[in-house]
Image (spheres, rainbow, N blue to C red):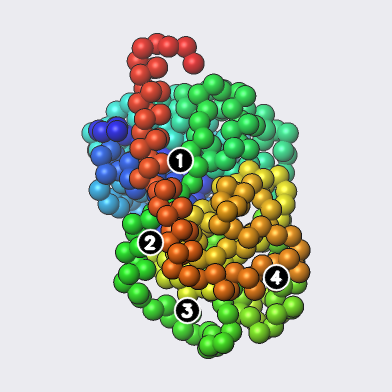
């Protein structure tokens, strides 16, 4: 257990966005430490565009950089008047302004010598500016597969350099452990998990969801659901094939839609009358929406991206005791005793038909037990042990 440390968590997205593993980890670490969750960067081009569109006003320029969230967790935002820019656009000056603002925030919190927790290779530019005692690189995906990455070779080179510099590297899947661990001996597998106690409390509360209540009645029509990020790792053509084969089933898609790099991502599914889109729901509503499904899906493409993921939603499906039908990806194989792993539309239809009958109390309890053996409290305890070891290596001067 670590106590009294300051952790600067450099994130690629806002705290209020889709909840991911970093939200779960930082919430728990903040119970005994000071955590600054540093939201996504502001770039000069985007700032200029938003200024021209009238989307940014004087109040935005004056917004506080530091906002208390809960316990020892603070949300930190770089000053909007100091965007990231290239050398010819005043990049050195705005970098100095941002670092000065961060030092003021650390001083205000009485913090010194923080732990840097980096989530993307481009965050390596923060190393060496705050007298940090530790650099952690947390790898949760094969980022080179993201649509926004246009130069994969340069990206891989940048990531390798960060891995070699880090004092501790955490990865979420065996595939990532293989591909990243060769660059740093202090690379460890820490899979994803679920807030099991939180899920059970939410399920016991039995809250109704207006978003589901607004759908046509599901009486006699099974609800088949997917809850998570809707991006190009999802096989929408597969979903369309299943939905066309069984027009009497409701298919409910829950999550933020991201069509980056593939504008026609959902064109095969969008017109289908038995497919419903609820958008992203608040994190506290996720247990209830999963509980409302008869069968949950993990309809992933089979590619390098999905070969390296550890699916958060799978743990959450199991925490609700739901039957799951998935494509053959490594994340599903971890729970192959509990998950129907199939290929193609016909395979999915047959497996869903079987899963619709698998709601006995014994099966539900078995699924929940698998989730209860993989909680975020367990994962954070593992992470804290690895942080202590890394700190001891640094203090003892042990070569990395």
Quarter of the view holding residue 358:
bottom right
Residue 344 point in image, percent of width and height: 76, 63
Q: Is residue 129 left or right of residue 328?
A: left
The mark closer to the camera, 4 or 3, is 4
Question: Does residue 235 appear in this view?
Answer: yes
Marks 4/3: CA–CA distance: 28 Å
Marks 2/4: CA–CA distance: 29 Å
Residue 145 point in image, percent of width and height: 68, 45
Q: Are marks 3 and 2 in contact (CB under 8 Å)?
A: no
Marks 2/1: CA–CA distance: 27 Å
Badge 4: residue crowd in 10 Å (few <14, some 14–19, many ≥20) = few
Q: Residue at x 59, y 58 (%)?
A: 339
Q: Residue at x 35, y 74 (%)?
A: 206
| Front one among 79 and 219 | 219
Quadrant for the N terminus, please.
top left
Residue of label 4: 350
Q: Is residue 267 left or right of residue 108?
A: right
Marks 3/2: CA–CA distance: 19 Å
Residue of label 1: 10
Residue 49 vs 2, above or below: the answer is below
Q: Which mark is residue 304?
A: none
Residue of label 3: 211
Q: Are marks 2 and 4 in contact (CB under 8 Å)?
A: no
Q: Are marks 4 and 3 in contact (CB under 8 Å)?
A: no
Residue of label 2: 199
Q: Secondary structure at mark 3?
A: helix
Marks 1/4: CA–CA distance: 44 Å
Quarter of the view holding residue 96:
top left
Q: Residue at x 50, y 71 (%)?
A: 359
The mark closer to the camera, 2 or 1, is 2
The mark closer to the camera, 2 or 4, is 4
């Amino acid at each position: 257990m670590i106590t009294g440390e300051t952790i600067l968590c450099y994130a690629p997205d806002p705290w209020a966005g889709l909840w991911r593993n970093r939200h779960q980890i930082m919430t728990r670490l903040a119970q005994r430490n000071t955590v600054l969750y540093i939201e996504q960067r502001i770039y000069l081009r985007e700032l200029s565009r938003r200024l021209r569109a009238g989307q940014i006003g004087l109040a935005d320029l004056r917004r506080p950089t530091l906002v208390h969230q809960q316990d020892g967790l603070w949300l930190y935002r770089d000053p909007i008047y100091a965007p990231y820019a290239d050398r010819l656009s005043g990049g050195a000056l705005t970098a100095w302004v941002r670092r000065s603002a961060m030092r003021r925030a650390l001083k205000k919190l009485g913090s010194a010598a923080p732990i840097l927790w980096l989530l993307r290779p481009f965050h390596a530019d923060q190393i060496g500016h705050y007298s940090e005692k530790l650099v952690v690189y947390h790898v949760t995906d094969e980022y080179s597969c993201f649509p926004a990455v246009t130069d994969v070779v340069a990206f891989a080179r940048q990531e390798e350099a960060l891995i070699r510099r880090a004092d501790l590297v955490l990865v979420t899947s065996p595939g990532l452990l293989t591909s990243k661990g060769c660059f740093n001996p202090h690379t460890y597998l820490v899979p994803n998990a679920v807030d099991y106690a939180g899920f059970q409390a939410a399920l016991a509360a039995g809250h109704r969801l207006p978003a589901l209540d607004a759908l046509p009645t599901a009486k006699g029509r099974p609800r088949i659901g997917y809850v998570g990020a809707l991006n190009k790792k999802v096989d929408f053509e597969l979903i369309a094939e299943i939905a066309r084969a069984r027009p009497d089933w409701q298919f409910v898609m829950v999550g933020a839609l991201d069509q980056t790099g593939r504008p026609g991502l959902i064109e095969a599914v969008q017109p289908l009358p038995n497919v419903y889109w609820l958008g992203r729901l608040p994190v506290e509503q996720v247990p209830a929406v999963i509980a409302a499904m008869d069968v949950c899906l993990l309809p992933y493409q089979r590619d390098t991206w999905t070969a390296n993921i550890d699916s958060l939603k799978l743990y959450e499906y199991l925490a609700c005791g739901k039957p799951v039908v998935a494509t053959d990806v490594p994340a599903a194989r971890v729970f192959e005793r509990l998950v129907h792993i199939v290929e193609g539309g016909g395979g999915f239809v047959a497996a869903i038909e079987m899963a619709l009958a698998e709601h006995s109390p014994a099966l539900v309890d078995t699924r929940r037990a698998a989730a209860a053996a993989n909680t975020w409290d367990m994962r954070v305890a593992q992470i804290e042990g690895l942080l202590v070891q890394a700190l001891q290596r640094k203090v003892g001067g042990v070569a990395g």
